[in-house]
Amino acid sequence: MHQYNISSKIFREFLIQGPPPGPIQESINRYLPGFDFRPVRTIDEFNVASQLIYQEFLSQQFILPHHNHRKILLHQILPSTVTFVAHHSQTNKIMATVTVIEDSPLGLPMDAKHYEQLISLRLGGRHLVEFNLLAMNHTVEADNVLYMTRQARLLVIYHLLRSVLDYLRMHTEVNTLVVSYKSKHDPIYKLLAMDKFEKAQMVFKLTDNWALIHAGRFEEWIGQKINHPAIRLFFGDLPIESPYHKRLFFSESEIKTLFVDHSNLLLSLTEQQMVAIQRYYPLYNLRDLAQSKDVLDHLTEAIDHHFRTKTKTT
């Protein structure tokens, strides 16, 4: 069994002193050797991540049971949305995952409840990105392959989010992170120090079950990192060469499997959304993919109706 016995003392020292100077890989080598934090690279990894999210969200009663045992969002169909994982190479286990959703013509998942607040940021010239589908693997200990203290798990989450922020700074033009979360997740997002600095945030009080929206501006975070250890944790030195180039891009058949066969998400699109997504895939015929599901459903219904009628007449 692989063991990561990070003590409370070591974790406190990490929070106070920050990670080792230099790119994030130096911190990974010191605290979590054997892990890599990166985008999913294969459809199998994506499926494992989506199943992990489903299991975690179901156990927390965030979602209802579903026969496909996956949790995916329509926004994940876009190439600008990236699913990151904490991957343990020796055991080939995914320990945690988070999905990074860059603002697009589809908007953000948070728009469903917080459209007016997000519009105010967009009108102010902010290029938004949302963190979503954060989940931790709690089954590896039962499998007797990995043992991790609570502090080690928190370090996994930290290195995962830090790697995502490195990716965003190196590969995108986003400048504002927005998150919305239930109050029980507050300790995780407090690591981002999004509620500590008045000049680096916009906080909106909500009336539903979600606790807060936090919006952190990258340039103000980076400007304060010298004076605030919490900011230094997440905005350190970038690697000279990006380790994030290798990542999954869906094939046409994979889109059909995930967003038509398993979820029906492609069938729920408005005409405007279909046009917006099709621009990202000029060589794919997304309309045919959606219609193929309709034809199959109608054919199945017709066959079922035929046999039901035949059974009654006999």
Image: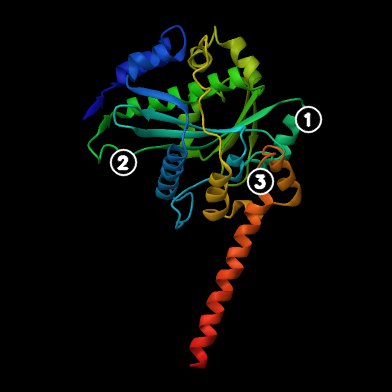
User: Left or right: where does residue 190 sit relative to residue 293?
Assistant: left
Tag 1: residue type?
Leu
Q: Which mark is residue 112?
A: 3
Picture quadrant of residue 205? top right
Quick one: SS at disc 1?
helix
x, y (%) of residue 123?
A: 78, 30
| Label 2 vs 1, first from the N-terminus | 1
Q: Are marks 2 and 1 in contact (CB under 8 Å)?
A: no
Q: Nearer the viewer, mark 2 or mark 1?
A: 2
Residue holding disc 1 = 123
SS state under label 3 = helix
Quadrant including the N terminus: top left
> Could you say which is closer to the camera, residue 144 or residue 200?
144
- Tell which of 104 and 298 is nearer to you: 298
Mark 3 or mark 1, which is nearer the start of the sequence? 3
Label 2 secondary element? loop
Question: Would you say 107 lies left or right of 188 here?
Answer: right
Residue 174 in the image: state x and y as whole percent. Answer: 66, 24
Query: Tag on residue 139?
Result: 2
